[in-house]
Amino acid sequence: MAKKTLRDVELAGKRVLMRVDFNVPMAKDGSGKITDDTRIVAALPSIKYVLEQGASLVLMSHLGRPKGKGYEAEFSLKPVAEELAKQLGRPVAFAPDCMAADEIVAAMKPGDVTLLENTRFYKAEDGKVKKDDEKKGIHLTEEEYQAKKAELKEKRAAMAKKLASYGDVYANDAFGTAHRAHASTAVVADYLRPAVSGFLLEKEIKFLGDAVENPVRPFVAILGGAKVSDKLKVIKNLLNKVDTLIVGGGMAYTFLKAQGMKVGASLCEDDQLGYAKEMLEAAAAKGIKFLLPVDNVVADKFPAEKDASDITMKVTEGDIEDGWMGLDIGPKTIALFSEAVKAAKTVVWNGPMGCFEFAPLAKGTFGVCDAVATVKANGGMSIIGGGDSVSAVKKSGKAAEMSHISTGGGASLEYLEGKVLPGVAALDEK
């Protein structure tokens, strides 16, 4: 069922508590300069709508991966508050402690905006505990582990309750963290209703949900990246949905080896060969096309230089010789994959075809990108599912030619796995 959105609730005179994803990249020099404001810009439609409706707005987000032990300057959201004020053309108050913002929030009037400090400065935000942590020398007994889990769950609930006290309405517009059952993303909705979706989250659910559950066929999924183990459940789930599954990148070599091909020194997960065989057999039994590389760009070693000038490369069909490693798909594979993509009406792409960070090894990823860019122009739907695929599309200059570019790497992957996302599940049904 569809979730309620900001449009479905009365906002005038209310205070809206909104979870956004302001986890933006910062300059490494400690200047607090934001190097890419994409996530801030993506949240603006929801923010502006709330303010136009005559409500005040309390924003919460995380930034980076602080340890949950209090304030860490490099992960402060203060520079984001300043940038947001510029983008909105109005002041944005900053609460230096997300758990002690009562005074600032109480003084807010309609049209006011406050950004809370990083929610992950508190361990209670994620409420996670490790049973064994080799680095810290922690080894808990089952009893200790369960007691610690219960304690942190209680603290997470208390944090969610505190955050909920800042608003009359809760809105989640952070798809990038919707797969986390954190205090600010899901648990807060236990203490604050109505709980609705922002426009960015609504868009993500619509595009990914429609693509996976009600695709216009032919439906082609392209998976790439380094490891099969990262996408085990995605492959399994998509084999029940797609007409064609394309696998490239480092993960392809595990499938090629499972078919009996020699892969030389290429990345290969031998412990996943059984799984790879199982998936290939499942695809054959269902009549699904499972496309793998037919030629590869191989090198004598992994490049250390940005221009890959320190390696020797060649294109190989069939077996890869010992001592050589596959680092990109070859020209025949680009043509094979592109043909399948151009015939599709729905395409979902997650993961590059090779080491596209090095210019001489980007031809495969950019070749597939060119093909995906034709889908929208031909009346189809093309969805880029987060992570490195987004970087590749932006780098290729084809971003405007895609139907939808997801803002959530891990979240879009879990959505493709068929998982229920806690941050979405917590919201009110229409």
Image (spheres, rainbow, N blue to C red):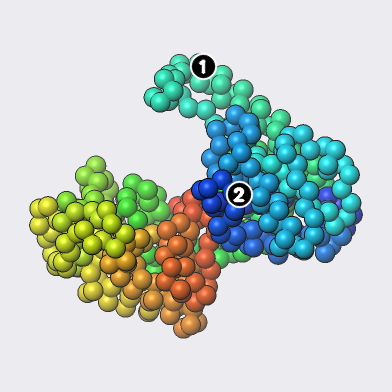
Residue named by callout 1: 144
Q: Report the side of 415 relative to 351 (left or right).
A: right
Q: Nearer the viewer, mark 1 or mark 2?
A: 2
Q: Is residue 62 above or below residue 288?
A: above
Q: Position of residue 334 (x, y in %)?
A: 28, 73
The three-letter amino acid code for the residue at tag 1 is Glu
User: Is any part of residue 374 visible from this angle?
Assistant: yes
Relative side of 148 to 5, left or right? left
* In the rendered image, the vertical position of residue 174 relative to residue 7, given as above or below: above
Is 86 situated above or below 97? below
Tell me what residue is drawn at x 48 percent, y 27 percent.
Answer: 130
Please state, as top left, top right, bottom left or bottom right, where the N terminus lies in the image: bottom right
Q: Give the residue drawn at x 78%, y 48%.
A: 93
Q: Position of residue 13 (x, y in %)?
A: 89, 54
Between the C-alphas of marks 1 and 2, the distance is 40 Å
Q: Quadrant of the C terminus?
A: bottom right
Residue at 39% x, 24% y: name it. Answer: 134
Q: Residue lying furthest left in this view?
A: 321
> What type is the residue that disc 2 sits on?
Gly
* Image side of residue 430 versus residue 179, left or right: right
Report x, y in % for residue 287. 30, 66
- Callout 1: helix, strand or loop? helix
User: Residue 164 placed where, x, y %?
Assistant: 76, 40
Q: Is residue 263 visible?
A: no
Q: Report which residue position mark 2 lands on.
A: 32
